[in-house]
Amino acid sequence: MALVNEHFLKLPNNYLFADIAKRVNRFKTTHKGVDVISLGIGDVTQPLCPAVVMAMHKAADEMGDAHCFRGYGPEHGYDFLREAILKNDFLPRGIHLDINEVFINDGAKSDTGNIQELIRWDNSIGVTDPIYPVYLDSNAMIGRAGVKDEQGRWSNVEYIPCNAENGFVPSLPKHRVDVVYLCYPNNPTGTVITKAELRKWVNYALKNDTLIFYDAAYEAYIQDDSIPHSIYEIKGARKCAIEFHSYSKTAGFTGVRCGYTIVPKDLTAATISGERIPLNPLWNRRQCTKFNGTSYISQRAAEAIYTPQGKEQVKATINYYMQNAAKMLQTFKELGMEVYGGENAPYIWARTPKGIESWKFFEELLHGAHVVCTPGVGFGPNGEGYVRFTAFGSHERTEEALERIKQWMK
Ligand SMILES: *Cc1c(COP(=O)(O)O)cnc(C)c1O
């Protein structure tokens, strides 16, 4: 008899966005012809920039030519892209990494989910709450998260609340944790972490022998020069942190699939007898076994982001989304709503009026304004009483949605 991994049965039945889609579809079938605008799911809408498209065409032509056709690439990615990453994303910030510390991935979701394979099943984990669901669900699948209670809390997880009451600044864990996940700029709250606050985390990690998994997927949206783009801007982080990057939100690669993970060579974890084991060779071993690399075409596409034209074009699209964010913030404030984020991230985190529940507000907004938001509670217990709006729409649709919300709120 093949026994199933019963840890899967502890997971909520639906992925949050599948649940939202189901409710929206139900609304659409009972309200035929009604035009619904989504400010919900975190997918981009603007096309790839010309520099990227050109690079993909060129790479496709190479693949069709016997002289430069490429089969399996290196599991950790091509050096042309790893070098471009070092030169553009890290050197200008004074961060010196070795090329073998860069692992090209097929998007950050895979690696943020897979990275927990490097640690024993009985490590304790901490997350800021609310949080991107992948971190906890991937730990739950192998039993590390424990069991879920009625409030949706996992028994073996230390939740670190981030809410209006603490200004979305996570305090250090009350109980020591072996591993902590941080995501900045944050999905879903759109808030950022200052260098001073991040330094506290690095120092905590060094002192307590805690591993930090740092998700920097929205780093390209940072507008304020004082906000760190990488945890390696903090001294000592090489000894305690793995960092994840993605081109999905940076350059509209949600359908192209490419990103990268940094595993520093100085980073170690202990065996039960106390021996220190470097994680970089372990991750390399894991990738060589379970991953056959990101497609050549996607990696050439990513390389093009770092050309002068690519940089300019990618920035223009980010500015486009950030204009949406600015308009949304302004409108919501005029309506007297309590809103956060949206200044260094494409997300706006809004407190629901009169403290009504996230899902209730979601339904009221859908029925009243025909606009879709994401219920905050879907991102964790501390998301209750909030909803997330994304700035990834077109200008026209975003403005239309704001106009409807204004009418509805009146
Ligand atoms: C979108 C997102 C990612 C990246 O997803 P990809 O797999 O690279 O498309 C990673 N982390 C967070 C928090 C995200 O919102």
Image (tube, grey):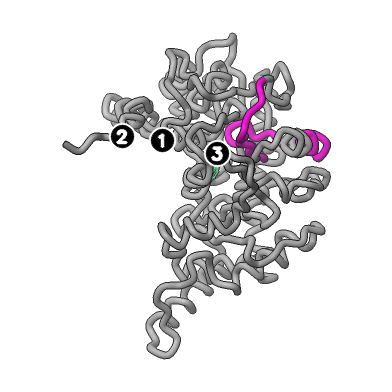
The residue at the far bottom in this view is 67
Tell me if residue 260 comes above or below residue 236 in the rendering.
below
Q: Quadrant of residue 161?
A: top right
Return the disc, 3 or 1, that comes first in the chain's sequence.
1
Q: Quadrant of residue 292?
A: bottom left
What residue is drawn where x is 48% and y is 35%?
A: 121
Q: Is the C-beta separation of discs 2 and 1 under 8 Å?
A: yes
Along the line of sight, which residue is nearer the eye, 318 or 181? 181
SS assignment at label 2: loop
SS assignment at label 3: helix
Return the disc, 2 or 1, that comes first in the chain's sequence.
2
Left or right position of 160 against 19 = right
Image location (x, y in percent) of residue 328: 63, 33
Q: Say which residue label 1 marks.
A: 142
Residue type at mark 2 is: Asn
Image location (x, y in percent) of residue 76: 53, 64
In the image, which disc is placed on residue 398? Answer: 3
Quarter of the image for the N terminus: give it. Answer: top left
